Each structure stands twice: as C-alpha cells, then as structure tokens.
Amino acid sequence: MREMPYIVTHSRYPTHKIPEVSKRYLEVMKKFPPDETLSEEIVPASVKATELGIATIGISLVKEGKLDEALKRTTQSMLMYHDIEGYEFSIEVQNTVSEALAFLGMSTSE
C-alpha cells in the first residue's frame, strides 16, 4: 500500500473565547466524528496556551485515494468555527518522509 500524506490543521484564538470554542468543538465532533475510512488521527487535537492566545494542532494520515474527500471534510469541520471572533485556522497537506523520498526515486530502506 502506498503511503499517503498528512493533513495538518492549525488554529489560534483568544483566551477569552475558550468557552465558546470548547462548546463549538463538541458540536463539530458530533457532526464530524473521526472517519477511519478517510484517515487515521495521529494527533486528534493538541492544545497549548501562548502569549497570543490558544494554539491547536491536529494531524491525520490520509488513506490511499482519499485525499480530496478527507480534505473536504476537514475544511467543512474547520469552517464551523468561522463566526467566532478572533478564530483563525489553516489546513496544510504535508508529505510523509516515505513520500518525499519517493519523489527523489529513493526509499526509507536505502
């Protein structure tokens, strides 16, 4: 099986929005529970407090042939936060090491 990329989400929001974001997170999880047919959650949600507010990161390993569908689902879930003042997010697709080496005609077994 070919290794697929990661979907990495980052978000940041002000600390005074913690209750609102937390409530919304529970709503998002009900509407978009993990779908193991699309991806495997490597880091479901990592949260830290910073001088700029709260920062989160989530990482999922996409299943073969499911990138478009997984990316659409991730985007739809993140857009549920759009109306929370100060909430910003980004979504990145990043290659695994195996994929990056494959682009160079190499493998991790070399």
Image: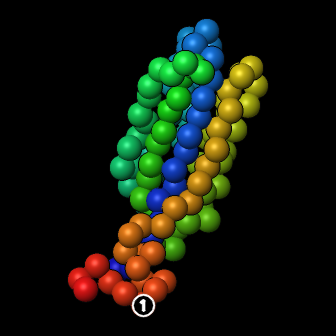
Residue sitting nearer the eye, 52 or 34: 52
Pointer 1 residue = 105
Residue 92 visible (yes or no): yes
Quarter of the image holding residue 52?
top right
Relative to 23, 86 lies left or right: right
Say which residue appears at 34% left-offset and 80% top-offset.
1
Residue sitting nearer the eye, 40 or 15: 15
Residue sitting nearer the eye, 81 or 53: 53
Relative to 37, 79 lies left or right: right
Residue 39 visible (yes or no): no
Q: Position of residue 27 (x, y in %)?
A: 56, 27
Q: From this viewpoint, which residue is outermost toward the left?
A: 109
Kind of element beneath mark 1: loop
Amino acid beneath label 1: Gly
Say which residue appears at 39% left-offset and 49% top-offset.
41
Total number of numbered discs in the rendering = 1
Q: Position of residue 12 (x, y in %)?
A: 60, 29
Residue sitting nearer the eye, 68 or 36: 68
Say which residue appears at 51% left-offset and 22% top-offset.
50
Q: Position of residue 17 (x, y in %)?
A: 62, 13
Q: Position of residue 4 (x, y in %)?
A: 44, 70
Quick check: 71 above or below 82?
A: below
Quarter of the image holding residue 88?
top right
Q: From this viewpoint, which residue is outermost toward the bottom?
A: 105
Q: Residues within 10 Å of mark 1 (few under 14, many from 20)?
A: few
Q: Quadrant of the C terminus?
A: bottom left
Quick check: 30 above or below 13?
A: below
